[in-house]
Image (cartoon, rainbow, N blue to C red):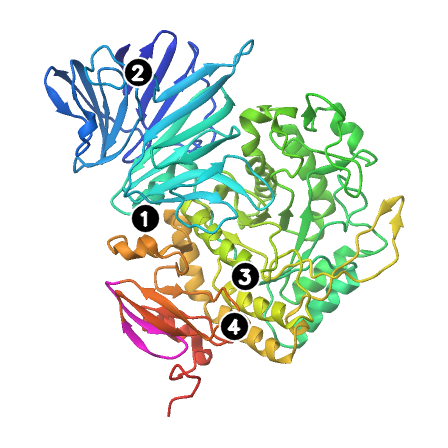
Amino acid sequence: MMVRQDGNRLIIERGVSQVWIECWGENSVRIRMCGEPKMDENDWALEEKVPECVPKIMIKELDITDPWYRGEEWAKYHMVGKEYTFINGKLTVKINPEGWISFYNQKGDLLTAEYWRNRDRVCRYAVPIGVPAREIKPIAGTSDFELTARFEAFDDERIYGMGQYQEKNLNKKGAILELEHRNSQASVPFMVSSRRYGFLWNNPATGRVVFGANKTEWYARSTRKMDYFITAGDTPAEILKQYSAVTGRTPMMPEYGMGYWQCKLRYRTQEELLAVAREHKKRGLPMDAIVVDFFHWTRQGEFKFEPRDWPDPDAMVKELKELGIETVVSVWPTVDERSENYGQMAEKGYLVRNDRGCANHSTWMGDTTYYDTTHPGAREFVWEKCRENYYKKGIRIFWLDEAEPEWAYEFDNYRYYAGPALQCTNIYPKMYAKGFYDGLKAEGEEEIMSLVRCAWAGSQKYGVLTWSGDISSTFRAMREQLQAGLNMGMAGIPWWTCDIGGFIGGDITDPAFQELLVRWFAWGAFCPVFRMHGERSPWYEREREFIDGVRQLTSGQDNEVWSFGDDNYEIMKKYLFLREGLRPYIRSCMEAASKTGEPVMRPLFFDFPEDKHGWEVEDAYMFGKDVLVAPVMEAGVSHREVYLPFGASWVEVFTGKKWEGGQVVDAYAPLDVIPVFTKEESVRKMFGNLAKDQDGEGNERA
């Protein structure tokens, strides 16, 4: 093993293998390793230009017992050889004589370290079980490698971020996570540690991460290199700011994104959709966007309105604009083999290829193949069709569905322009969004936003609003979405939403579902985007319809705010206007996200990192810096406990009660009230008359 300096880079060489250590933005480093003489050149998520930083590099001869890991008795080795120290601002990287790496902050506190348990020629007390920190194994007969990277585990560590997984825990310590996308699962492999560092696994290959009690282990099934980014910060806000600087920041959210979005599965015809929009405005209710969902098209992959049920989309879009409503149109990446575009796309290599078996990837509502979003030509082709058939009609917002993509998840059978799916499939949703972002930019659009059912690291810079997929209509799913949304924010994706009321199921005549919907609707008013959607079974009974041999999909029950009973309508109407009253505050939250990368909705510890109990709270969150939200996520509740962080005085918005932070309080929570607290009187005033002055028992104060 040899360590040498090449300009501002340290290189660890062992045979043909190299490890590169270099500055990558403020207080941050990027570490890459290859198993071949030439390093793979893909930057993946680290595409943003970063300022050049000059590290401080020091070399020290070791010949005495030296505690490499402070406070860890097992790691006090008798070392000989050279220790290399690489410093970039608040982050210090140390390389021991065997080439293993540890990371410290500016105070000398250990942040994390590589896990190695193999016998070394310079370390007398190393454990001889033969487990290296970095293991890159050639896959026989190929130029590809199987990769494992191991790091020490710490009992006191809490881990947040990593994207969106359907499970109950906000803290991912102890979790095993697939590094793969699925419907309702988005792998965004950036984590924030309670030990005050952030870590990006900059690799879109399929694999897994284990945040175990004995070690943390990152694994890629097939790849060309190891590549990760680590950043040190005194607060979570500083860590997210540094991370978003190197992966890209979200643009400023358009004004229409901050209001109310109406959606259902699905508005079957142009007239059905317009009737809903007209009724909404007739009632004087706010609405900023309405969605034309899937199967409004002729065939999958033709990207245009079916003329029988959508006879005049130009007039529809014009009328909606006059009502102050933006039209959102669903786009799928599936291309029916009978579509007018299939032959040309196949001929030009614009479709995802199979290594074996039938070329069709899905048989739902047609025999279809996914288009290859990693192919620049394919992205341009699809955008051009959407420009001609949607954008020229005045449509600026696209719902990019099926973005994982949602096939059989047999990643070893698919191949992209960018390489085997095993090595790069996780960039699919990011490239999907990039195609529309680039197309809209080229048309001169400045406010760009796409609703996308998945994301990867860096997706945020393409104006991605991620939603959490086809979740069930249950309180359990609602609870899971809270941690999913918070962890998406901590993974650098600040625009997030979910289907209010859940997607699968939800009988609008069932009182139990009505209760769930009302609770979810109130919570939705405090999500980055406030959006109603759902399947709403049982579906209406209609005859099986076919147009040109294509089965037509019917609709579920109604899904408008007046569809769930008069009493519930009044509650939901209240939250529609509450959201409108909060627009100035929400706008300031979106500006902060665009400028610094901070999440709009975030765990309590983000704003109160010194409050140890705040790191443990998983059922409440901050909506911006001044509003604390505690959704009710179970049936039959009229009160709930809420922890208020210390360091602030809090006002319970719907009762006017004042509380000092650092305590658990009993919050007022009948069906029409979501517990909300604010630090600032100016913000409380935005709630207007909706924040009734009540005594906590529902009685108005004198």
Real-space CA distance between mark 1 and mark 3, rounded to the nearest whole angstrom: 31 Å
Q: Secondary structure at mark 2?
A: strand
Q: Residue furthest top?
A: 15
Give the answer, above or below, for where 509 lies relative to 256.
below
Whichever of callouts 1 and 3 sits on the residue coming sooner in the sequence is 1
Residue at horizontal 50%, vertical 68%?
579
Q: Which residues are magenta?
A: 646-659
Real-space CA distance between mark 2 and mark 4, rounded to the nearest whole angstrom: 61 Å
Real-space CA distance between mark 3 and mark 4, rounded to the nearest whole angstrom: 11 Å
Q: Which mark is residue 237?
A: 1
Residue 612 position in % (x across, y down): 26, 54
Q: Secondary structure at mark 3?
A: helix
Dot in front, 1 or 4: 4
Q: Secondary structure at mark 1?
A: helix
In the rendered structure, the answer to whether residue 407 lies left or right of residue 494 reads right
Asked whether the beta carbons under mark 3 and mark 4 sit within 8 Å of each other, the answer is no
Q: Residue furthest bottom?
A: 702
Residue topped by disc 4: 636
Asked whether the beta carbons under mark 2 and mark 3 sit within 8 Å of each other, the answer is no
Residue topped by disc 2: 11
Residue topped by disc 3: 475
Asked whether the beta carbons under mark 1 and mark 3 sit within 8 Å of each other, the answer is no
Dot in front, 1 or 3: 3
Whichever of callouts 2 and 3 sits on the residue coming sooner in the sequence is 2
